[in-house]
Amino acid sequence: MLEQSLLFDTPELADTQNIAVNLAHVCKGALPAGIVIYLEGDLGAGKTTFSRFFIQHLGHQGKVKSPTYTLVEPYELDGVTVYHFDLYRLADPEELEFMGIRDYFAENTLCLVEWPQKGADCLAAADLVISMKSHDNSRKMTITAKSPRGTDIVNGLSVQGN
Ligand SMILES: Nc1ncnc2c1ncn2[C@@H]1O[C@H](COP(=O)(O)OP(=O)(O)O)[C@@H](O)[C@H]1O
Ligand SMILES: [Mg+2]
């Protein structure tokens, strides 16, 4: 499959916010099919910041905590459940089996997964992979579609990539 991919420069927080808000909007329109988004990038790249804007746009009022210690934070929102994972501290992907990971990837749920590589084969496949890089004063984000649904979502975005 030819992967649809968009590259963005995101030097300002507002750039990251714009993309997160636009993506959240398009994802909401793609429900009730479940959507899985992997967030890749080093510590400080902006994965949690992006998730915060995304989840708040879907209607969550108040704080979006980093799930670093809890592994997952759930958000029951209007018309959608968001599960925000951070697998950074996961010692063994098998722990995900014990927490019943498969039940999280369901209809009408949107899963955001930071550090997906730590989950190895225990995670559902991604519809979208968002990769972030922060280097000196430059920040970049790439959104890549990994499934037909992901391709529809990327094609539905109104933010313009490079
Ligand atoms: N343009 C930007 N996009 C995203 N984060 C930014 C941007 N500019 C500054 N930041 C800051 O960079 C930090 C990113 O941290 P965080 O989102 O926790 O990263 P990660 O979850 O990838 O480890 C936050 O303090 C955020 O405010
Ligand atoms: Mg984080």
Image: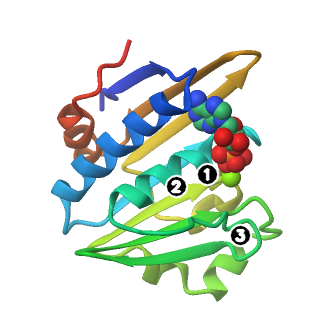
In the image, the residue with mark 2 has its CB under 8 Å from the nearest atom of ligand 1: yes
Name the residue at 72% across, 79% down.
95
Amino acid bearing label 3: Pro
Check whether the beta carbons of the residues at disc 2 and disc 1 lie within 8 A of each other.
yes
Q: Is residue 114 above or below residue 133?
A: below
Name the residue at 22% across, 66% down.
33
Q: Ligand 1: which quarter?
A: top right
Q: Earlier in the sequence, mark 3 or mark 1?
A: 1
In the image, the residue with mark 1 has its CB under 8 Å from the nearest atom of ligand 1: yes
The answer for how far apart the CA atoms under marks 3 and 1 are is 21 Å
Residue wearing tag 1 = 48
Horizontal side, residue 49 vs residue 110: left or right: right
The answer, for residue 32, to whether it is visible in the render is: yes
Where in the figure is residue 110, as x and y percent of width and height? 37, 65
Where in the figure is residue 155, as x and y percent of width and height? 20, 32
Q: Earlier in the sequence, mark 2 or mark 3?
A: 2
Name the residue at 30% across, 26% down.
2
Check whether the beta carbons of the residues at disc 3 and disc 1 lie within 8 A of each other.
no
The local secondary structure at tag 1 comes to: helix
- Closer to the camera in the image, 11 or 42: 11
Amino acid bearing label 1: Thr
- Closer to the camera in the image, 150 or 159: 159
Q: Quadrant of residue 75?
A: bottom left
Label disc, if present, on residue 113 of the rendered structure: none
The local secondary structure at tag 3 comes to: loop
Disc 2 versus disc 3: nearer the observer: 2
The answer for how far apart the CA atoms under marks 2 and 1 are is 6 Å
Report the residue that reaches farthest toward the front: 62
Residue wearing tag 3 = 93
Quadrant in the picture for the C terminus: top left
Where in the figure is residue 133, as x and y percent of width and height? 65, 27
